[in-house]
């Protein structure tokens, strides 16, 4: 499975960009040989955290291509909450968003043959092994 996180964030929180990029690359490496079914082969998640004055320009989107077996969607974090977090808590919020946001998206598109339980299980264990979460 291919995986990536797109970072759509305001200048005030660019200090978290390396954490988001590193997290994306490590999850990509971890998931590349995992078999979670043929329903999704490419999963791209957009992380949106922008100053409220830009909210209107960054609305979460969801898109699924059955022929390409590619799911793309965004989730949004509260800017005022996120910008005061330390690096550890910022990563935890990002990881929580990744784990919690997929259920509604899968339900919307009725994606068959994707093992969401295994996806979450693999990621939770990986996050714990990396000591990103407790």
Image (cartoon, helix red, strand yellow):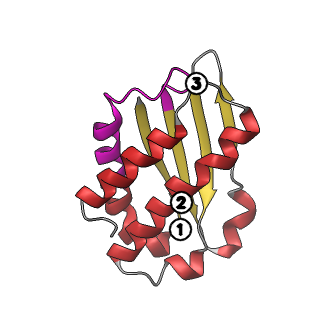
**Nearer the observer, disc 1 or disc 2?**
2
Residue 82 at x, y = what percent? 51, 76
Res 113 label: 3
For marks 1 and 2 on the same chain, the one whose residue lies earlier in the sequence: 1
Left of 64 or right of it: where is 94?
left
Point 50% across, 35% down: residue: 43
Quarter location, residue 122 = top left
Q: Which label's residue is closer to the chain start, 3 or 1?
A: 1
Q: Which mark is residue 97?
A: 2
Does the magenta segment cover residue 30? yes
Front residue of 51/19: it is 19
Which residue in the protein does label 1 denote? 10
Mark 1–mark 2 distance (CA, rounded to whole Å): 18 Å
Label 2 secondary element: helix
Q: Are marks 1 and 2 in contact (CB under 8 Å)?
A: no
> Given contact means CB atoms under 8 Å apart, are the residues at marks 3 and 2 in contact?
no
**Residue 14 placed where, x, y %?**
41, 68
Q: Secondary structure at mark 3?
A: loop
Residue 34 seen in the current view: yes
Spatial distance from mark 3 to mark 2, Cα to Cα? 22 Å
- Which quarter of the image is occupied by the C terminus? bottom left
Highlighted magenta segment, given as a residue range: 21-42
Please name which of the two marks, 3 or 1, marks the residue nearer to the observer: 3
Residue 14 shows in the view: no
Q: Is residue 86 above or below residue 23?
A: below
Q: Is residue 67 above or below residue 11?
A: above
């Amino acid at each position: 499975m291919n995986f990536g996180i797109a970072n759509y964030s305001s200048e005030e929180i660019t200090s978290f960009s390396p954490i988001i990029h590193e997290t994306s690359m490590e999850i990509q490496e971890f998931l590349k040989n995992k078999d979670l079914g043929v329903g999704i082969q490419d999963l791209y998640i957009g992380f949106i955290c922008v100053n409220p004055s830009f909210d209107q320009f960054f609305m979460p989107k969801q898109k699924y291509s059955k022929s390409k077996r590619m799911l793309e969607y965004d989730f949004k974090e509260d800017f005022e909450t996120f910008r005061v977090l330390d690096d550890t808590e910022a990563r935890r919020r990002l990881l929580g968003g990744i784990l919690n946001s997929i259920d509604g998206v899968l339900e919307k598109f009725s994606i068959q043959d994707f093992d969401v339980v295994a996806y979450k299980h693999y990621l939770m264990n990986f996050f714990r092994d990396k000591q990103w979460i407790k």
